[in-house]
Image (cartoon, helix red, strand yellow):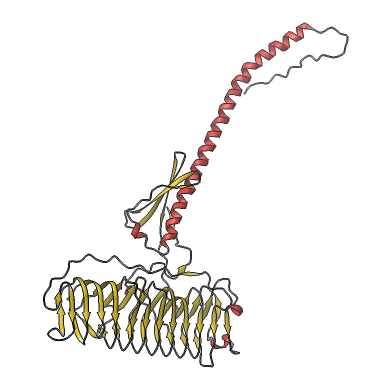
Amino acid sequence: MVGVTVVKLPIRTTSSKPYDRGEHGVAFVLVMVLIPVVLIYGGALLQGVLHDARSVDLEQKRLKAYYLARSGAVAVLQWAQSNSVTDLLGQQSAPVSLGEGAFSVEVIEDADGSIIIKSTGTVDGVSQVVKVRPQPQEVAFDSALFSSGDITLKGSAGITGQVMTNSSEPGSISISGSGGIRIDGNVYIGPQGNPLEVVVGSNNLNPFAVVSGEISNLQEARNYPTPLLPDFPNLPQVRDGGPISGGVLKVEGGKYKTYTLTEGGYFQSIEVKGNGALYINVGSADMQIRTRNLDISQGHIIVQGSGNLQIYVEDSFSIGGSSTVNAGGSLDDVTVFHRGSETIDIGGAVVFKGSLVSESANVELGGSGAVTGHLITGGSQVSVQGSADAETRLLYAPNADISVKGSGYIRGAVIGRTIDVSGSAHVTFVDVDLDSIPVNLSGAGGSAGASKPMWL
């Protein structure tokens, strides 16, 4: 420890005593002694201040780089709420400038096969890396009706099961009719909604009197993402022969009123008309068929064997009259994946037993048609009317305005943007077998705006 000597220096006063030159010399010597001490300790102090300043500057850059990296990871997580993050596997973004630095993101596969989002933020040459593992949310299909917006019930419509909406806006659930309208189940509205304002009736109808259960709030809004189709397989074009010419298969009467297909492949078009019957023998394995167009305007497709059939339709899919698809089978036997944009009209007395997944098409189910299986679409309109009977298990159209009119009947869970049930139409909830859903809907029913990530 350095000792400190307190020296009393001479002070010039107005006294008449002569100034002592010896005292002046002592003061000068003391100053000369102190100067090296000040230089040594002052230099050390300055070095410490400069080091601390550099440390603070480096720490600030590290902190900024960390938050840049986290921003990049969060951006990918938000994108993954309505898309499949596996589509980005193995890809790396170019640097994205933001504020005083930049970040880049890549999606990699961990040693255990899980997906990792790795994001690197850089500020003035200082980099920080963050990693996050997206966690799939529990899928929830537990209501007869779910809408992200309005639900309208009119006439003598009936609902058996829970009714839910994300909306907290007044009048989001509107109930009107002359009598017979009924909801056998609980009703849930948006987290911030007032039940007395959100659920309303008309024509002196007390909406609370037609609900057998409770009316309460969702704990948090739900998220049902847009469905994503799997990649269409690259298949060899089928060989010509029999009713196949130029890649076009026609089964429509005459010599080829019936035909049996025993192998998959790529077709320019498949047409089954004139009460023709196309037998597809899949054997004990799955079979894949890809076609530009599928036209079953008046015909029948019969699936044979213990395997499953996947039909990939690039453009148009039409079915009508009294056509049937897999009428004697189960809903797991057939899945039609559709990438076209034209409306799919399932009318007449059609019987379709299987699942239909469309990327963006509107769907109309009318007449006395019957569909047994999942109906999934990213389209904006779905209509079930007439005496149509849809044992859909899951009618999943989160971007669509769904209407169920006339004496239409749906058994399953209905997911839409808005839902209108009128006339004597009825919707009855049936449990959804999640393993039977032909596309990945991970996160469906989870909290809106959340993906439950695990930061590593």
Please report the residue visible at 41 percent of the width from the left and 47 percent of the height from the top.
95
Q: How many marks?
A: 0
The image quadrant that residue 390 belongs to is bottom left
On the question of residue 51 being in view, the answer is yes
Left or right, 363 with reference to 143:
left
Left or right, 137 with reference to 176:
left
Residue at the bottom extreme of this rendering: 179
The image quadrant that residue 225 belongs to is bottom left
Please report the residue visible at 58 percent of the width from the left and 27 percent of the height from the top.
46
Residue 402 spot, x, y in % from top left: 44, 79
On the question of residue 281 being in view, the answer is no
Residue 212 spot, x, y in % from top left: 53, 86
Quarter of the N terminus within the rendering: top right
Q: As rendered, which of 365 and 170 lies closer to the eye?
A: 365
Q: Relative to residue 18, is residue 68 depicted above or below?
A: below
Residue 198 spot, x, y in % from top left: 58, 78
Residue 181 spot, x, y in % from top left: 51, 90
Residue at the front extreme of this rendering: 246
Q: Relative to residue 192, is residue 348 depicted above or below?
A: below
Residue at the right extreme of this rendering: 16
